[in-house]
Image: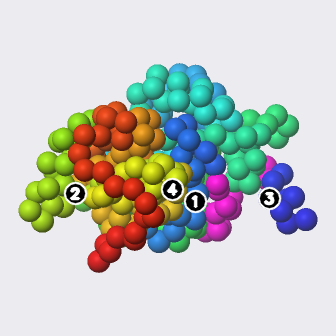
């Protein structure tokens, strides 16, 4: 009965409640599991009802402040009942880097209390989930971005620069909006296999080559320098890399490595590269056979 009540919840989860499980597919096919962020990152969940001007304006404001959220160890996901192909189109149209996530029949939205009462659709609502998986902030509709930044800062035990400046600065016109979002995250860059090997061959190179194909593909043909983590396993295994920067992703042709790179940038990674053409265009050293575990100590 408790599960049924959760699925039919009409009021948003209260602050302090343990967030319900979330396991959904992002617009690029990445599998997003809320529990994978426990103890590592805060999660800002933005449920939105439609594709109108209010939604577009809000997600663009979040994108403008994304670097500030990342600096506060917070990742953003926008949740809607549209299928992944439409969500990809929306994210491209809105020009945002964080993932849009597919919620079939608004089941996750219902568990959070962010769904329409009758129709299987999301309502506009924002939830901040702390590293302890507890709800830290609930906002019906789309709040001011500065409100969300303050909530994240409080969860991190720090104070925003605007608030340290005192009441006079906060009273200035426009101070309720984020005016200085900081430097945006670095874009993913495409490189050739020759350029990838040059980075990997540096003395004491900090770069890691990550092959995100299936095990059978990797065992048939790979770079001997590659670490194997399949793309759909990356969200809950990226900690095995022990770094979120200076990563080079490769797949067979380029699509899966691009998805992996986008995921890493969404959680604050930088100096992220993908190999143009993937292993189909790889001109460097090759290996085959069973995959040997690599020591990442």
Across and down, in percent, residue 108 comes to 71, 50
- Residue under label 1: 34
Tell me the CA gap for discs 2 and 1: 28 Å
Q: Quadrant of the N terminus?
A: bottom right
Tell me the CA gap for discs 4 and 3: 38 Å
User: Which corner quadrant of the image does residue 85 belong to?
Assistant: top right
Q: How is the image coloured?
A: rainbow
Tell me the CA gap for discs 2 and 3: 45 Å
Across and down, in percent, residue 11 comes to 75, 52
User: Which corner quadrant of the image does residue 282 belong to?
Assistant: top left
Of mark 2 and mark 1, the one earlier in the sequence is: 1
Tell me the element at label 2. Answer: loop
Q: Is residue 280 left or right of residue 88?
A: left
Q: Residue drawn at (41%, 43%), measured in percent from left and top?
A: 251
Q: Which mark is residue 207?
A: 2
Q: Which mark is residue 215?
A: 4
Given this view, does label 4 or label 3 mark the residue nearer the observer?
4
Magenta stretch: helix, strand or loop mostly = loop
User: Which corner quadrant of the image does residue 102 belong to?
Assistant: top right
Tell me the element at label 3. Answer: helix
Q: Are marks 2 and 1 in contact (CB under 8 Å)?
A: no
For label 1, the crowd category at 10 Å Cα-Cα, with few meaning under 14, some 14 to 19 and many 20 or more, is many
Q: Residue drawn at (40%, 69%), measured in percent from left and top?
A: 292
Q: How many badges with numbers are in the image?
A: 4
Q: Which mark is residue 63?
A: none
Of mark 3 and mark 1, the one earlier in the sequence is: 3
Q: Is residue 84 above or below residue 231?
A: above
């Amino acid at each position: 009965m408790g599960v049924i009540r959760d699925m039919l919840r009409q009021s948003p989860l209260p602050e302090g409640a343990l967030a319900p499980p979330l396991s959904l597919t992002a617009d690029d096919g990445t599998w997003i599991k809320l529990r994978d962020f426990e103890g590592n990152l805060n999660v800002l969940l933005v449920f939105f009802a439609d594709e109108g001007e209010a939604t577009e304006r809000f997600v663009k404001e979040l994108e403008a402040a994304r670097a500030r959220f990342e600096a506060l160890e917070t990742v953003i996901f926008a949740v809607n009942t549209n299928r992944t192909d439409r969500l990809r189109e929306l994210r491209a149209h809105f020009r945002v880097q964080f993932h849009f996530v597919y919620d079939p029949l608004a089941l996750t939205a219902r568990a959070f209390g962010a769904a329409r009462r009758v129709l299987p659709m999301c309502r506009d609502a924002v939830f901040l989930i702390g590293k302890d998986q507890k709800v830290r902030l609930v906002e019906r509709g789309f709040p001011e971005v500065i409100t969300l930044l303050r909530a994240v800062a409080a969860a991190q035990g720090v104070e925003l620069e605007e608030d340290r400046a005192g009441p006079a600065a906060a009273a200035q016109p426009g101070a309720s909006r984020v005016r200085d979002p900081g430097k945006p995250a670095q874009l993913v860059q495409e490189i050739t296999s020759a350029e990838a090997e040059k980075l990997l061959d540096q003395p004491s190179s900090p770069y890691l080559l990550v092959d995100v194909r299936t095990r059978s593909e990797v065992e048939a043909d790979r770079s001997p320098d590659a670490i194997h983590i399949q793309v759909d396993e990356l969200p809950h295994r990226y900690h095995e890399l022990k770094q979120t920067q200076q990563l080079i992703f490769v797949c067979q042709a380029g699509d899966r490595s691009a998805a992996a790179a986008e995921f890493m940038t969404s959680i604050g990674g930088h100096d992220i590269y993908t190999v143009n053409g993937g292993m189909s265009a790889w001109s460097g050293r090759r290996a085959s056979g069973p995959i040997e575990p690599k020591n990442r100590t």
